[in-house]
Amino acid sequence: MTKINKLMTSDLHYCTVLDNVYEAAVKMKDADVGAIPIVDEDGKTLVGIVTDRDLVLRGIASKKPNSQKITDAMTKRVISVEEDASVDEVLHMMAEHQLRRIPVTQDKKLVGIVTLGDLSLAEQSNERTGQALSDISEDGDSQQGFIH
C-alpha cells in the first residue's frame, strides 16, 4: 500500500505567522500555487493555511491589506494527514472534507503537501482520485478545501 510521503511535494513554499498578507501573496505568485501553509515562528509547526481566495476575501477586502497579518487571513483549523497515511486514507479525507490539497505532517511539523494532481500521478489511484475529484466538485464552490 502506497504511503502519502511517497507522493507528496516536500519542496515546500510556506509563510510564518510573522508574514503579512502581501508577503504571502508574493510567495504564492512566485511559487505559482493557490494555497500556502502557515507555520509557527520556528518555521516547523503547521498552524494554518491561506488560499488565494482567503487573500481576496480576508486580505484585500480589509482596510490595510498590505500590512494585515497573515494570521488574520489564514484558516486556523487545518485538516492535515500524517506522512505515513495511505493513499486511500488521504483520498477519503479529501472527499469527506471537500479538499483539493492537504498538508502532510509528522508530529504536527509540516513536511509536505499533496494535491489531487499528485495523487492522479500514482497509477493505482487513478480511479479513486477521479471519484474523489467528482465528490469534491459536486459541492460546487468549495472553500478551496480548507475548513474555516
Image (spheres, rainbow, N blue to C red):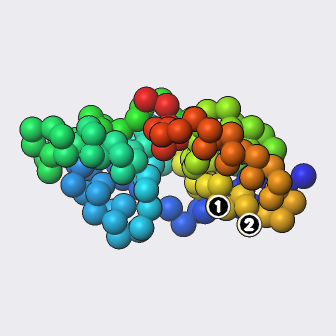
Q: In this view, does 74 lie to the left or right of 23?
A: right
Q: In this view, does 97 lie above or below 86?
A: above
Q: In this view, does 8 lie above or below 136?
A: below
Residue under circle 2?
Answer: 121
Residue 117 visible in the shown view: yes
Q: What element carries label 2?
A: loop
Q: Position of residue 80 (x, y in %)?
A: 60, 39
- Residue type, mark 2 in image: Leu
Residue 85 visible in the shown view: no
Q: In this view, does 111 lie to the left or right of 62?
A: right
| The one of 67 and 43 positioned closer to us in this rendering | 67
Q: Is mark 1 on a helix, strand or loop?
A: helix
Q: At x 14% / y 50%, what residue is drawn? A: 66
| The one of 104 and 143 positioned closer to us in this rendering | 143
- Residue type, mark 1 in image: Gly
Q: Position of residue 56 (x, y in %)?
A: 27, 46
| The one of 129 and 43 positioned closer to us in this rendering | 129
Q: Splitting the image into 4 quarters, where does residue 115 fall?
A: bottom right
Pointer 2 with pointer 1, Cβ within 8 A = yes
